Amino acid sequence: MASIFSKIVDGTIPSYRVAEDDRHYAFLDINPVAPGHTLVIPKRETDYIFDLSDEDFAALHLFSKKVAQAIRAALPCKRVGVAVMGLEVPHAHIHLVPLNTEKDMDFSAKDTDPDPEQMKNIAEMIADKFSELNA
Ligand code: AMP
């Protein structure tokens, strides 16, 4: 059965899209630990990130780097933190979290009811910066 993230890629499930290329898709985490918390996935479904081929693993990280640069340009943050968990969704993904303090990386403190308008605006701001930086 297709993962929830594959359904996001094929448009069956909506998402706050941030960026994509032919092999990768980036979108806001629906329960962000900080505003701008983004997930980056390979479009081709693989459960465990460390089962990706070396080439796919490297490509995912290089695409994540571009997304992180767009997040930092779009949002007020000191750094963009990186995490890999995969305990909930069996489709490889990288969490990118705009950080101002260590607490912004607290995955036990998710916003379970983010404002849809704010999510839309944040996704658009990151998407605009991504386009600008990669024109
Ligand atoms: P994990 O697999 O432990 O890395 O966690 C999966 C992450 O995916 C969690 O942070 C969820 O909030 C997020 N998530 C689950 N479903 C969706 C969705 N439909 N859209 C965006 N993010 C999601």
Image (tube, rainbow, N blue to C red):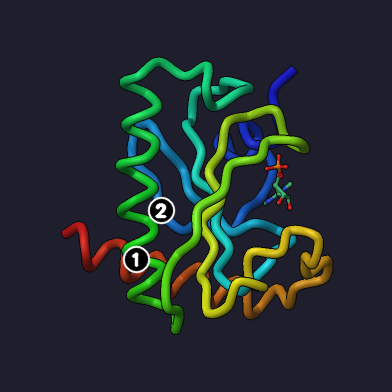
Helix, strand or loop at disc 2?
A: strand
Query: Which amino acid type is marked by label 2?
Result: Ala
Question: Which is nearer the eye, 2 or 55?
Answer: 55
* Label 2 Cα crowd, 10 Å radius (few <14 / some 14-19 / many 20+): many
- In percent of the image, x 75 and y 73: which residue is there? 114
CB of residue at label 2: within 8 Å of ligand 1? no
Residue 22 in the image: state x and y as whole percent: 34, 34
Look at 50% across and 53% down and name the residue there: 82
Using a 10 Å C-alpha cutoff, classify the residue at mark 1 as few (fewer than 14 neighbours), some (14 to 19) or many (20 or more): many
Tell me the number on the disc at residue 70: 1
Residue at the extreme front of the image, as rendered = 102
Q: Position of residue 52 (x, y in %)?
A: 47, 19
77 to 88, vertically: above or below: below
At 46% from the left edge and 43% from the top edge, which residue is drawn? 25
- SS at circle 1: helix
Q: How many marks?
A: 2
Question: Could you tell which of marks 1 and 2 lies nearer the N-terminus?
Answer: 2
Q: Residue at x 40, y 15 (%)?
A: 53
Identity of the amino acid at label 1? Ala
Is the residue 11 above or below the residue 100 in the image? above
Image check: 12 left or right of 87?
A: left
Whether label 1 touches label 2, CB < 8 Å: yes
Quarter of the image where the N terminus is located: top right
Residue 34: x and y, percent?
64, 71
Circle 2 residue: 19
